[in-house]
Each structure stands twice: as structure tokens, then as C-alpha cells.
Amino acid sequence: MTDAQASPGQPKTAIVTGGARGIGAAIARRLSADGLQVAVLDLDEAGAKATAAGIVESGGQAIGVAADVSDEDAVRAAVAQVATELGPPLVVVNNAGVTRDNLIFKMGATDWDTVMNVHLRGAFLVTKAAQSYMVDAKWGRIVNISSTSALGNRGQVNYSAAKAGLQGFTKTLAIELGKYGVTANSVAPGFIDTEMTRATAARLGLDPEEHMKNAAARTPVGRVGRPEDIANAVAFFVDERSGFVSGQVIYAAGGPRA
Ligand code: NAP
């Protein structure tokens, strides 16, 4: 079956986790602009609903759904709700994320577990719940948000392990699900101006604007990233015409590394 046969003009449904703000909200808005219906899934129910409301105001179709991606029952219920209210989720963007930075000698096991649970267990649970709809439809798109930290980053042994893990997860999904018309790819952002990076600045005792300026200075394109930069890379993988691209990682970082 070709991509065209799999999409007889019906808008497809996407789930974007962590879509209440930052990169996830930009991805949700971009996928809506590209013609998808979007379920914005987040711990922060008010934020998820606000992102969805903004999309609806702009003429799109979206719902906000509250769920902790690391909670198996909550994920199962949320994905079923999306299927009932919007239609089978054929696109999943695993974007929800947290940081709990510290040098390894100071890092507690709870901070290790929290990061693994949100990024890895979360991506596993959401993908597992949605993939059966994709397999039934013989079409699907999975995009996992990794990070340049997958290549190693001081103070982020938990986060970099999780983000590298997501790349392995992506490649294996591509191998297992390819025969069902499902692609799996990963976008690995560099430094993006969001609450996550502003919170990092605050934790390091740095002025956020100074922190951004420093990051821009070490980035080849001379600026930090915007959430829309990442949404654009995600949109490429989700595109109907990207069906022959699978198991890949795009570093969207303003250079080979940022
Ligand atoms: P952000 O502004 O902190 O947004 C993350 C969103 O994820 C928040 O709305 C948060 O909700 C939600 N979330 C956290 N834990 C969750 C859970 N268990 N279940 C459901 N939702 C949850 O972060 P961001 O900068 O947009 O980052 C988005 C993704 O890009 C993350 O995976 C991050 O690791 C990755 N990334 C970011 C950068 C960067 O420079 N910003 C670089 C590389 C990769 P709450 O507010 O309720 O916690």
C-alpha cells in the first residue's frame, strides 16, 4: 500500500506529549497547521487545554488531555480517549521531558529514576498504546525528541543516558514497525529557548539572557534555537512524503553540536 492509498483525505490524529508549552506546544501548532488533528497530552492539564484552545482558535482541531506519561493506566486511558474523541492516533511525538541535573557523585537514585521514567518509560508506554492503531491502519509516524546531550553532557548523566536510549528505541521501532507502513525517527535539539533552559540558567545562578547569549556564541549559526525550529524537523518526519526515511536522527542544533 502506498502512502497516498493510506490517506484518503481524512485528517490524521497526532498525539504530542508535553505539549502544554515549549517545544511540544510548537510541534502541536505546526502539526495542526499541516492539517492534522492534535491531542495535546501533558501533566499540566490547564496548559494542555490552553495549547489546544489556541489551535482551535486558529481554525484547527485539538483537545487537551491530562496524563503522566510514566503512568501506564493514565497513558492507556488517555490514548483511548484520543481515539474516541479525535480518531485513531497515527502520529505520536514523544516530547515530554524533565531534567534533574547533577554530577554523578551528587545525583540521587530518585533523580536518575525520574528522568528515565519520563523520557524512556513514557515514550515506551505512549508508543505501545498507539502503535496498534498505526499497525491496523498500515500507516504511522513516530517521532522521539532526543537531545545533543545524547552525545554526553557534564551534569546530565541521567538525561544523556535517556536521550541516547531514545535513539536506540527509535531505531528498533523502525525495524519492527516498518513493514506496517510506520516510520520512527528522532529529532535531537541543541539549545532551545524554553522554560527548561531558563530553569537551568536559574539553577546555575546565571541570568537567563546571559545564558542564551553564551549558548548563541558557541552555536555555528550564531543564535539559540526556537521551539519552531524543532517543530519544523518533526514536521518533515511526519510528512506523508517522508515514508522512506526511518530510524534516523536529525540533530537540529544550529551546527553539528550546540
Ligand atoms: P519544557 O518547557 O520544560 O516542557 C516540557 C513539558 O513536558 C512540560 O509541559 C511538562 O509539564 C511536560 N511533562 C513533564 N513531565 C511529564 C510527564 N511525566 N507526563 C506528561 N508531561 C510531562 O521543556 P522543552 O524545553 O519544551 O523540552 C521538550 C523536549 O525537548 C524534552 O524532551 C526535552 O528534553 C527536549 N529538549 C529540549 C532542549 C532545550 O534546549 N529546551 C534541548 C534538547 C532536548 P509540567 O510543566 O507539568 O512539568
Image: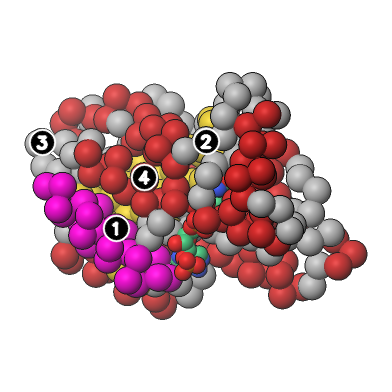
Query: Distance from label 4 to label 1 (Cα)?
Result: 11 Å
List the residue tagged with mark 1: 51
List the residue tagged with mark 2: 225
Q: Nearer the viewer, mark 2 or mark 4?
A: 2
Image quarter hosting the C terminus? top right
Q: Is mark 2 within 8 Å of ligand 1?
A: yes
Determine whether the residue tagged by mark 2 lies in a helix, strand or loop: loop
Query: Distance from label 4 to label 3 (Cα)?
Result: 24 Å
Query: Which residue occupies 35% across, 66% down?
Result: 47
The type of residue carrying mark 4 is Ile
Q: Nearer the viewer, mark 4 or mark 1?
A: 1
List the residue tagged with mark 4: 27
Query: Distance from label 1 to label 3 (Cα)?
Result: 28 Å
Depth order, front residue of 183/218: 218
Q: Is residue 107 visible?
A: yes
The type of residue carrying mark 3 is Pro
Residue 73 vs residue 121: left or right? Answer: left
Depth order, front residue of 87/40: 40
Q: Is residue 32 above or below residue 75?
A: above
Query: Distance from label 2 to label 4 (Cα)?
Result: 14 Å
Residue 8 tag number: 3
